[in-house]
Amino acid sequence: MRSTVARLASAAAAKARPTLKGAVFDVDGTLTRPNIDFAAMYQRVGVNPAHDILVAVAAKPPTERKAAEAIIEQMESESRDSLELMPGAANLIAWLHARGVRTAVVTRNTELTIDKVTSLLAAEELIHAPCFDPAVSRDHPLPSKPDPASLHLIAEAWGIDVDASAGAPRSSGLVMIGDSPTNDVAFGKA
């Protein structure tokens, strides 16, 4: 009798949980080991660490903005030279793909960083290209996270309904995986 009740409770709980349809990943500190000194970046571009660096740089006068963007790109370029995957990242992506779970990436880095991450994952020989579809960087015309525009783009591309306007947030089967409370967690919640 107890096992029947346990099975029924488990079946009811499984019905309440959405099936995982897609996973959206951050890059720095999630798929890759953190290797950018963000404190130094903020200092070098003259932005208060309490502010969003991309927003603050975009608000600078054109000459200052271009100089700050060049510093950010230089630091990111240097970080790409020593970029390493987090342990288990390739295995996780391969595991998700083997189960039909789609993967995407949304990063505040450039497209070049996504390309580097993709090449590192391909070198593990567990994953076939394209690894992430879509792959959204700050080079994309959408606003950077935590603005949810790119997450909505991904959900739409995958045919997943994430509209929560009718009340409580829906359980869509889409998960955001990241390490930043202000960018990734806020992005996923939005």
Image (tube, rainbow, N blue to C red):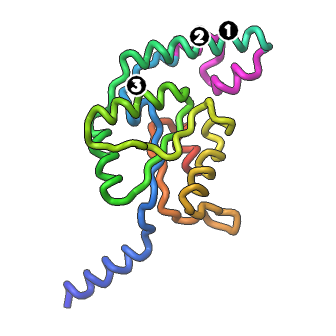
- Circle 2 residue: 71
Lower sequence index among marks 2 and 3: 3
- Circle 3 residue: 34
Whether pointer 1 and pointer 2 mark residues with C-beta atoms closer than 8 Å, the reply is yes
Q: Classify 100 as above or below 24.
A: below
- Circle 1 residue: 67
Circle 1: is it few (<14), some (14-19), or many (20+) Cα within 10 Å? some
- In front of the other: 177 or 77: 77
Quadrant in the picture for residue 70 = top right
Q: Does the magenta stretch include residue 23?
A: no
- The CA distance from mark 1 to mark 3 is 24 Å
Q: Whole-percent x and y of residue 90?
A: 30, 40
Q: Classify 88 as above or below 119.
A: below
The range drawn in magenta is 39-60
| In front: label 1 or label 3 | 1
- The CA distance from mark 2 to mark 3 is 18 Å
Quadrant in the picture for residue 79 = top left
Q: Whole-percent x and y of residue 22?
A: 45, 55
Circle 3: is it few (<14), some (14-19), or many (20+) Cα within 10 Å? some
Q: Which amino acid, by three-letter code, is at mark 1?
A: Ala
Tell me the SS state at disc 2.
helix
Quadrant in the picture for residue 145 = top right
User: What's the residue at 39%, 15% (across, down)?
Assistant: 81
